[in-house]
Image (spheres, rainbow, N blue to C red):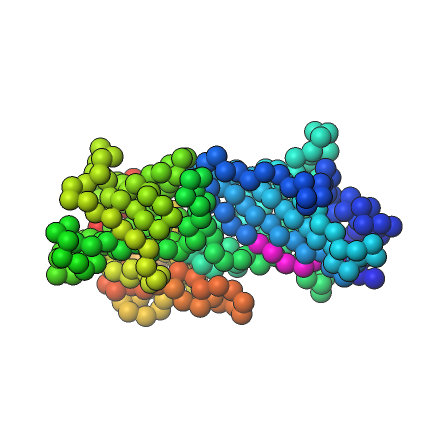
Amino acid sequence: MILRPNAVPACSLAGFALALGMVALVPAAQAVAPVDSIATLRTRYAGTLPCADCAGIRMDLTLIDEAETGKPREFRLKETYLGARDGERSFTSHGSYSIVREAQRTTLWLTPQVRDLSQARESRRGFVFDGIGGNGGNGGKASLTLLDRAGKRIVSSLNYRLDRLPPRSVVLPRHGEIPLPVRFDGDDADGTGGNDLALDLREDGTFVFRVATGGGTPAYTDFGTFRFNAAGTRLVLTGGAEAPHRFGVVDSRTLLRLDNRGRVERPTRDLRTVDYAEVEDALHLVGQFTSLADAPRFSECASGRSWPVAMSGDYPALEKAYTARRAQLKLKPGTALQATVLARLVSRPGMEDGQPDQATLVVEKFERLDGLHPCPVKGRHRH
């Protein structure tokens, strides 16, 4: 029999569930109705954890955020007891969740919905995010590790990890699911064909949007964050352009470009999903750069996203300027300094086995280092 560290041995399946802090559980057949009235972003994690009186507990966790605001909406957790004496059984729970970011770790707290509010704190469960994959943000966290009741890591050789299951997805109330990342391409305004519009929506809530001439020569490429409205009928891209880019959602595979007043552009400009390929155009980015223990990192100002930096391209010039300025200002190792670069965002394999690919910044051209300056109100993306 496998025992969870610091847990009270359970005499029954229900008893062990309570020992794990699971209250107000209901059978899977009575699962809570899905949040289908607004557009949401959904991220799944799954894994099999140790069990006191069964072969293991299969946990399937979904974190649901509002697509319009990015705020946490709720969690849904399905737990299946494998190889139990009285047969395999599943339970579901749901409630609110929060993410606490600290210097040394980022913690996920699940607070199940309970009948007795006095039990809410006791039933709360914690996980720590381990590893960063994908494109950062919730969608890029590679795994979750269960914490004990005191919020500390469980010291054990047993597995207490839930891995992120791709893809992260946008669920629209009228149009179904859009798996991320996704790419939409559009034809020229004059109908002659070609790909003059290319939109790359990424897992971390950022976009790369290329607008090209009829001959395919890039006119400009924009970068920033995207959001759907609550009804799931509009997509808005906020980047370095003077005004946001707006699209109407025809269905999960088709977008219609809108003007600044929200009206359909004339001639009509529609974009349709194609086989996914990143839009890797070079972007002018302003952000906070730091390098410590051969782990350089760039945190982009306008989007708030952070990526590891590849030690290729014009990276040596950036590293040299950073080292010199840090020495000049007598700053501690790892101090962040503001930098402007022309760079591409590309997917690279994760640092550890089993981790998904992660977005990596490749510096095409180092432009300048501005020292100890806070991020400007709006970064420069347009190229």
Query: Does residue 124 show up?
Result: no
Give the percent coordinates (x, y) of residue 356: 48, 63
Give the percent coordinates (x, y) of residue 368: 24, 56
* Residue at left offset 68%, top offset 45%: 28
What is the quadrant of the N terminus in the image? bottom right
* Residue at left offset 35%, top offset 69%: 311
Q: Is residue 320 left or right of residue 48?
A: left
* Residue at left offset 42%, top offset 54%: 180
* Residue at left offset 87%, top offset 50%: 11
Q: Quadrant of residue 369?
A: bottom left
Q: Is residue 372 left or right of residue 358?
A: left
State the residue in front, 12 or 252: 252
Q: Vertically, is 35 above or below 300?
A: above
Q: Quadrant of residue 334?
A: bottom left
Give the percent coordinates (x, y) of residue 166: 50, 58
In the rendered image, the residue lying farthest to the right is 11
Q: Is residue 3 left or right of residue 220?
A: right
Give the percent coordinates (x, y) of residue 41: 46, 45
Counting the numbered discs, the total is 0
What is the quadrant of the C terminus in the image? bottom left
State the residue in front, 344 or 79: 79
Query: Does residue 32 show up?
Result: yes
State the residue in front, 171 or 295: 171
> Is residue 351 magenta-colored?
no
Q: Determine the main secondary structure of the stretch shown in magenta.
A: strand
Q: Vertically, is 323 above or below 269?
A: below
Q: Which residues are magenta?
A: 45-51
Q: Is residue 161 left or right of residue 251?
A: right
